[in-house]
Amino acid sequence: SAVISQKPSRDICQRGTSLTIQCQVDSQVTMMFWYRQQPGQSLTLIATANQGSEATYESGFVIDKFPISRPNLTFSTLTVSNLSPEDSSIYLCSVVQGAGGYTFGSGTRLTVV
Amino acid sequence: AQSVAQPEDQVNVAEGNPLTVKCTYSVSGNPYLFWYVQYPNRGLQFLLKYITGDNLVKGSYGFEAEFNKSQTSFHLKKPSALVSDSALYFCAVRVTGFQKLVFGTGTRLLVSP
């Protein structure tokens, strides 16, 4: 299965600023997924990122707030912009290979102060 | 809409006793079902999946799950719980026609010595 390196592992950011999270995969993958896990909650899909096309956002998530880049088949970034305390969450990236081979990054714990 | 339900927020079991964490699903077509575990300050770790074949699926760390089509369930089980099994467990289903996963609300497992 793929190995994902996600950075940073945690950060504390001022409100109004932005944080960019990176995920590097050790193999080429078509789809990458970005999830948010709010405190004490389950994982909610933010968007699906395919290389060479704009990301597909889930209901309730917009590109202006969560811009995503996918410059190649092994890398993606998620930016959480104009931060507010409500954005304090764990953000995870994920990839899928083959039939149901999902792998998750170790997560980025964001605290907005 | 496709979904999974985890009816128990928390399951308490004594070490050495069998454990069950419940999951029911609602999907169109044949389901791809997954169990993940999350330890504090860690990402998601894959336990097992059902795609096709035997209804009893064996996974990591001695866990297993039984796919029951008539009851639309995919309960996670382990014959003898360990204190180190204490963690947050998520059931997930792949959305038919897409690669993205939908997660249940999670069940916290507490294994007492």
Image (cartoon, rainbow, N blue to C red):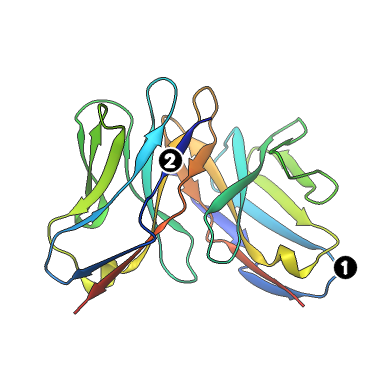
- Label 1 crowd bin: few (<14), some (14–19), many (20+), radius 10 Å: few
Please give left or right for residue B24 compared with residue A30 in the image.
left
Q: Would you place residue B25 above or below residue A2 in this image?
A: above
Residue A2 appears in the rendering: no
Q: Amino acid at mark 1?
A: Gly
Of residue A94 and residue A110, the one placed in the foreground of this image is A110
Please give left or right for residue B103 compared with residue A24 in the image.
left
Give me the residue at 49% from left, 51% from top. A3
- The residue at which mark 2 appears reads as B4
- Label 2 crowd bin: few (<14), some (14–19), many (20+), radius 10 Å: many
Give me the residue at 29% from left, 26% from top. B52
As drawn, the residue found furthest toward the front would be: B7
Q: Please identify the quadrant where the C terminus of chain A is shown.
A: bottom right
Q: Would you place residue B33 above or below residue B29 in this image?
A: below
Q: Would you place residue A50 above or below residue A112 in this image?
A: above
How many numbered badges does the structure rendering display?
Answer: 2
Q: Chain of mark 2?
A: B
- The residue at which mark 1 appears reads as A16
Q: Chain of mark 1?
A: A
